[in-house]
């Protein structure tokens, strides 16, 4: 894989406050990296340093081989950047804005026309191209921002909250576009939406208090959940105590916890030791005790639970 982004000890201080604290990571071509963290964790500050819009206090980043400190203009030419809030010229139309950005990017003639048309089509904004940006909804403004980021077909995309303000159908289209572009590019998505990470990202990096606290695939992070490979069950209330006794006798079961009781049925969760796969053992124990199961499923782990745990203790 081609190394497209190389972050080395990147740090940013504002007076005595350290917003980003010596973070290091790489991103290869073909990767979609989800950059996760709670509000104030340092995500946007890190993105602004990586894109050359904010000078690091220490460390550096190499973007397409260019150092953000010594070659910031080359870095800006190499990337497509959707900043937080996507500030736009609201008295312009999308057509005028994209034409302006194309000129800044050095596109002329037929190449410029083709780039503007292709970006508008991919983001599905053709029907608002001649409407003032200031009159557009938040979702359409976001789509215009994405269009300008992909206009020059960059090899590296840095997208800060790309689906912010979009409705479910628009989110689906943007995520589909990211998946389509992923094979040829290195893409970094700064987001707080866990379902976005699960849907489009091949890797997730979690930052809290300016430090990286987790780095792995979404599946790797799910495996850190207390619910990973847990078994959720629904049985009649009259069989609960018998079922609980049978299940607590299984070697790899750590805990049996009641979740919901509607008076006739009980939902409960069987937690495994060290995330071990226990669904077959649970099923066998219930059959041996002649307990009818209304519902049974094995949990894959929950990103939201992992996210809360690792960011609150950081």
Image: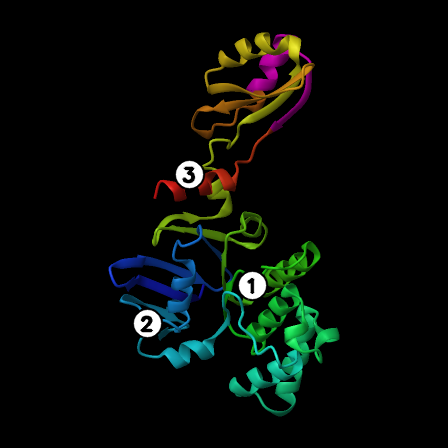
* Residue occupying image coordinates x 59% and y 51%: 199
User: Label 1: few (<14), some or many (≥20) within 10 Å?
Assistant: few
- The image shows residue 111 at horizontal and vertical percentages of 62, 87
> Alpha carbon of mark 1 to alpha carbon of mark 2: how far?
30 Å
Pointer 3 and pointer 1: residues touching (CB < 8 Å)? no
Report if residue 285 lies within the magenta region: yes
Name the N-terminal-most of marks 1 and 2.
Answer: 2
- Count the numbered circles shown: 3
> Alpha carbon of mark 2 to alpha carbon of mark 3: how far?
31 Å
> Disc 1 on helix, strand or loop?
helix
Residue at numbered disc 1 = 183
Q: Is residue 119 visible?
A: no
Judge from the rendering whether residue 225 lies leftward or rightward of residue 139; answer left or right.
left
Q: Quadrant of the N terminus?
A: bottom left
Residue at numbered disc 2 = 55
User: Label 3: few (<14), some or many (≥20) within 10 Å?
Assistant: few
Q: Which residues are magenta?
A: 281-297
- The image shows residue 190 at horizontal and vertical percentages of 48, 59
Residue 263's label in the rendered image is none
Judge from the rendering whether residue 47 lies leftward or rightward of residue 90; answer left or right.
left
Report if residue 109 lies within the magenta region: no
Q: Nearer the viewer, mark 1 or mark 2?
A: 2
Q: Quadrant of the C terminus?
A: top left
Residue at numbered disc 3 = 309
* Residue occupying image coordinates x 71% and y 80%: 130
């Amino acid at each position: 894989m081609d190394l497209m982004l190389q972050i080395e000890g990147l740090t940013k201080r504002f007076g005595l406050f350290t917003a980003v604290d010596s973070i290091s990571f790489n991103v290869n071509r073909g990767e979609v990296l989800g950059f996760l963290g709670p509000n104030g964790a340092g995500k946007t500050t890190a993105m602004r340093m990586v894109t050359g819009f904010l000078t690091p206090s220490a460390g550096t980043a190499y973007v397409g081989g260019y150092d953000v400190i010594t070659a910031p203009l080359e870095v800006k030419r190499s990337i497509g950047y959707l900043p937080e809030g996507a500030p736009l010229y609201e008295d312009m139309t999308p057509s005028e804005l994209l034409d302006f950005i194309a000129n800044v990017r050095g596109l002329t003639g037929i190449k410029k026309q083709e780039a503007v048309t292709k970006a508008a089509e991919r983001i599905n904004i053709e029907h608002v191209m001649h409407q003032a940006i200031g009159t557009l909804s938040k979702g359409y403004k976001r789509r215009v921002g994405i269009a300008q980021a992909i206009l020059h077909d960059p090899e590296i995309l840095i997208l800060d909250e790309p689906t912010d303000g979009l409705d479910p159908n628009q989110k689906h289209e943007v995520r589909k576009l990211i998946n389509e572009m992923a094979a040829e590019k290195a893409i970094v998505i700064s987001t707080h939406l866990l379902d976005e990470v699960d849907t489009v990202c091949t890797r997730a990096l979690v930052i809290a208090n300016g430090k990286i606290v987790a780095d792995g695939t979404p599946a790797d992070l799910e495996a850190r959940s207390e619910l990973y490979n847990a078994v959720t069950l629904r049985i009649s209330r009259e069989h609960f105590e018998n079922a609980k006794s049978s299940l607590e006798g299984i070697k790899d079961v750590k805990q049996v916890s009641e979740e919901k009781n509607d008076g006739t049925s009980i939902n409960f969760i069987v937690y495994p030791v060290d995330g071990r796969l226990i669904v077959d053992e649970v099923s066998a124990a219930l059959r041996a005790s002649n307990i009818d199961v209304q519902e049974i499923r094995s949990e894959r782990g929950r990103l939201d639970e992992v996210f809360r745990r690792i960011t609150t203790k950081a």
